[in-house]
Image: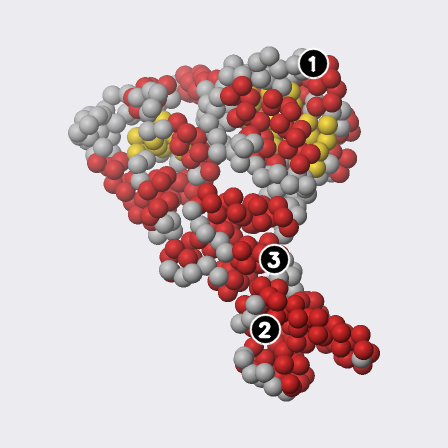
Amino acid sequence: MQFLSEVWNSVLAEMRENYSETLMELWFNELHLSYLSDDVAVISTKQKFKRDFLESKYTSVIHDYLTRVGFDVRIIFIATDEKSEAEHLRELGLAGDSAEGEEGTGGAEAAEPELDTPSDPAESDRRNKAFLEKGFDSGINYLSGESKKESVGSTVGSDYTFDNFIVGSSNKFAHAACLAVANRYASGADSDEEYFQKQYNPLFIYGPSGLGKTHLLYAIMNRISELCPEAKIVYVKGDDFTNQLIDSISHGTCEQFRSKYRTADVLLIDDTQFISGKVSTQEEFFHTFNTLYENHKQIVLTCDCPPRSIKTLENRLQTRFEWGLTADIQPPAYELRIAIMKSKAEALGISLPADVLEFLANNLRSNVRQLEGAVKKLGAQSFLTGAQITVDLAISCVADLMTGSEPASVTVDRILEKVSQKYGISVEDIKGRKRTKEIALVRHRSIYIIRKLTDLSFPAIGKLFGRDHTTIMASLDTVEREMAKDSLLEIEMSDLIRELRG
């Protein structure tokens, strides 16, 4: 196994250039390269949950690093907590005899399996077909190396539950609908089959990317697996459904493909918009939908827009998507943004001061991924540099994520420069501690314009000027009172703001 160890050590060395040791220790250091050929690499871990997580999150990453060290191969992950490495390899059709100790094949611990490649093309086709058929019955899609996320009690996405989904006004309805669908599978649950069929089937959740639609799908899968372990749950992304259909047609495994989807108890389709515009995919999905619906099997779909807005989607599918319940998820409101960041920070062991939370909530409004990414970035920056987490650190870390065409820090600089030129007071004096009447007047006006042109909170503006939020509020009040009494000042401030806006 010396050759395999050398290859894997090279991969880990490349990864350490880009990942922290904490992350390496958590996910990658214990991985083992079990098998390597010209077209496939088998990587083992000791735990099934880790295998599932790596399949869903890091397949392409590890493929890229193996490619860097010279192996452009398909990735298969295995877990050895239920079956031995040798058993996995035999099931994958990769077990065979090899000379022990031979470089690139064997080693002191065990002989590395050698791929048995038949010379007869017909035999090769037969084996390929059997290999693909086996892939439809197990937990791995051998065509792409990605997890199919299909199994009873699957731990793929096990981190996503209803318990750690932060609920607010923007997602409350979608969350409640998903919870109702999942809880229907509790033993002894008093559910009216006909009512659920009419009201909740299909359940169609839509909204922009990064707001928690996939989280809810995984939460449904995990809750149903917990309540009803025998339920067959199939999760797939819209584009993967298309790819699997194409592969099944090209390899003559259409019946296995149909059986996989049409015998499901629960079908979860993520990013449904990707099946639009594809005639064969829509035809196949139409019949799959009908079969499941007629058999009272639950269908849950997510999309980035409502059914009627999906371009090039066949009308017969559009109407079916609207048969049941449609729920939208909107970007999180201010309070929900705060709650999401607090939850993420607690999970990562990061302490975020209230003014930093307020600054981030005021400036990052697009989606949940953006908020979580900002918390991670702040935590990493603080850990690596030893810097205390402050609003200034937050501004420097997340300037590229902030709302608007320019980062807030750039906008503030432009405002101060413009005001400095207008009134002949240096930027240093505007931000400084001098309290002469002339400087204080210009400082008040600078604060007023910053508040009007940016989403910075009072504490965040206070940090820029070395003052607390009450002082900033007083400055704003001063300017507004002066403008109410002086129409020329109101015009002057409006002109300044208009010039800064361009």
For residue 480, side relative to residue 340 (left or right): right
- The answer to whether the residue labelled 1 contacts the one labelled 2, judged by CB atoms less than 8 Å apart, is no
Pick whichever, 27 or 358, lies toward us: 358
Q: Quadrant of the N terminus?
A: top left
Q: Amino acid at mark 3?
A: Asn
Distance in Å between CA atoms under marks 1 and 3: 46 Å
Q: Which structural element holds mark 3?
A: helix
Q: Residue at x 45, y 52 (%)?
A: 351
Pick whichever, 301 or 452, lies toward us: 452
**Residue indicated by mark 3:** 363
Residue 437 drawn above or below residue 471 = below
Distance in Å between CA atoms under marks 2 and 3: 17 Å
- The answer to whether the residue labelled 1 contacts the one labelled 3, judged by CB atoms less than 8 Å apart, is no
Distance in Å between CA atoms under marks 1 and 2: 62 Å
Q: Dot 1 surroundings within 10 Å: few (below 14), some, or many (20 or more)?
A: few
> Of the numbered discs in the image, which one, if any, rests on residue 193?
1
